Image (cartoon, coloured by chain):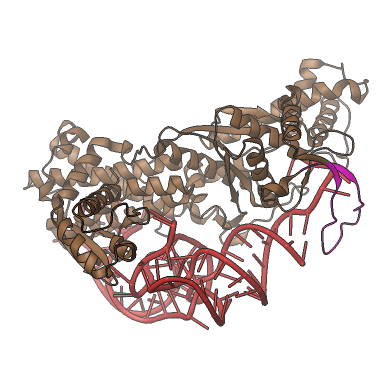
Chain colours: A brown, B red
Amino acid sequence: MNLFVHFRARVVDILEDMAGAGMLPEGLDTSRISVEPPREETHGDVTTNAAMVLCKPAGMKPRDLAALLAERLEAVEYVEAVEIAGPGFINLRLAPSFWHDRLAEIMGAGTAYGDSFVGQGEPVNVEYVSANPTGPLHVGHGRGAVVGDALAGLLEKAGFNVTREYYVNDAGAQVDVLARSLHLRYREAMGEAVKEIPEGLYPGEYLIPVGAKIADEDGDKWLASPETEWMERFRGFARDEMMDLIKDDLDALGIEHEVFVSEKTLMDQGKVQAAFEDLTAKGLIYEGVLEPPKGKLPDDWEPREQTLFKATEFGDDVDRPLKKSDGTWTYFAADMAYHCDKYARGFRSMIDVWGADHGGYVKRMQAAVKALTGGEGNLDVKLCQMVNLLECGEPVKMSKRAGTFVTLREVIDQVGKDVVRFIMLVRKNDAHLDFDLQKVTEQSKDNPVFYVQYAHARVRSVMRLAAEEFGADAITADVLAGADFGKLTDPAELALIKAMAGWPRLVESAALSHEPHRAAYYLQDLAARFHVLWNKGKDDASLRFLLPNNRELTFARLGLIQGVAAVIASGLRVMGVTPVEEMR
RNA sequence: GCGCCCGUAGCUCAGAUGGAUAGAGCAGCGGACUUCUAAUCCGCAGGUCGCAGGUUCGAAUCCUGCCGGGCGCACCA
């Protein structure tokens, strides 16, 4: 349960009762009432601004209204104390038994703790990575991949019906370039000496085995023929091979998209044309000449009549061209049709994860979604800022030409998938991220991955010792769920349960605001509280988890730490990180 | 020139729909190992939330204008 949602409902109940008794006006707007954790833990467990928000319509002073509310809140189950503070906050302190019940709830749920229904099964489409199929993924793609996948996981946990999707940009000129680059490698595989990769072709060595593969399959069939004859074959072959390469990279991160949509297929199926006709029917297409951008003019700018979409009617800055001068569709036209297709497949809610360099593209895509869905569809775009790859604080110098470019795969192989996934989430998506290959594998509290994993491993370590003492069967989650948690009375123990009980609220708010990084911060906080309690056991042996002479208390505490492990595992699962059993 | 993002402690950064005395880690200083792994923890110190106005019971948060940084700006994707 989200305890804040629970107590908010109680506050609203009381307000309705008061209105019914004529103490308050009927039909008060309760939407602005918040029930949340106080900023200061010393202020209690739950706070509400209800009196401050409603004092004006109620025609009362905030503290007077607060006093009336407080009187009634004292009668609410589990409320131990009510205080009025500051300008009219009402602070609730909850009985220890409330927290003990939460721990039982956590034990019963395991890693399912925090699962929510706020999403109400609403379909959400999360599109991420969508890198051009022209080569292996780089580290920047990796960030988008992790952010998108964690967001998808978070939304699922919050009760949305999520589809993970990848848009394959396989219709543009860059695939022609790829095909030509592959043809070169093919000739090389057939025994031709290739001295230098011509300017404008992809020099990467990853195409060498692909060239050998197509040589193996097709033999000398394309050696003497002109480009027009082999182009289609090479484009398709290269595309498929590159997508396999990318899928392997994603697989190494534990990411698997359910749906791949091909730009070329959309065009072949006439979906771009259909979207275009839809907009035309809505009167949103015209032939026109755009104003040149103010300020410095592009060198090759010249007035040109184009086929334009009235994006400005939907909040964009200028109208956007849908056709190139040769009559083919622009990238935007196809992407527009793609989002239209998502909507047609039942997604009102769409999320795209892009690199920050595509920021200028957001408004027009949102405009297109509004136009094509009659305002029904909603597109949120998460822009991921750059990843600075470092080694002991020094920037890793990368150059594609010099062959010193570090791929995502190399980073995963070096530090591990779990480290990559966690680190990619320690900053919000729109902030630059420093990724230090050295620091992320250090075993110190500076390293958030380690810090959180260590907390989980410590729990497992205690559980292993407990299994030796009591037998594994005696301390299963099911058995411990029935322990007498009333024995947990130390403030640090209760603080730990309170932190765990905050997980459902975090899941809901992070999911609704599309901010997966908050899970990483939450886990660091929870891990910190666990480490605090652990160390208290050093100063005061009576606070240790394993007490040979007190089986009842020991079992309650094993439940407590098992709960911590479950919530950490639950959070890590959202992030796509595997919890470790022990540190090595 | 226009648009988007950002500006919080010496450093790196949290601060959901506006809430109380703005938080954490690192770095600095001082402490805690006969251990359920001290790979951790405790304490101290550190701030005109870029600047100036505005909105209101209340602003780091919302609005306006500046200053500073990043990204983008027709027929690339």
Counting every numbered tag in the picture gives 0
Q: Position of residue A268 (x, y in %)?
A: 76, 23
Relative to A434, A262 lies left or right: right
Whether residue A295 is in magenta: the answer is yes
Using the rendered image of the protein, determine whether residue A355 is visible from the camera's viewpoint. yes
Q: Residue furthest left?
A: A549
- Left or right position of A315 against A561: right
The correct choice, above or below, for A88 with respect to A369 in the image is below
Residue A296, position as x, y percentages in the image: 85, 63
Q: Nearer the viewer, residue A443 or A555?
A: A555
Q: Residue at x 42, y 32 (%)?
A: A121
From the viewer's perspective, tell me whether residue A423 is left or right of residue A215: left
Q: Is residue A204 visible?
A: no
Give percent across and percent down for residue A390: 59, 57
Q: Which residues are magenta?
A: A287-309
A567 and A268: which is toward the camera: A268
Residue visible at 27% across and 51% down in the picture: A12
Seen at 41% across and 51% down, the residue is A450
- Rendered position, A313 above or below A157: below
Which of the two residues, A315 or A176, is positioned nearer the viewer here? A315
Please state if A498 lies on the left or on the right of A162 as rendered: left
- From this view, report whether residue B64 is shown above or below residue A192: below
Q: Between residues A308 and A36, which one lies in front from this camera angle?
A: A308
Is A484 magenta? The answer is no
Q: Main secondary structure of the magenta part?
A: loop
Quadrant housing the N terminus of chain A: top left
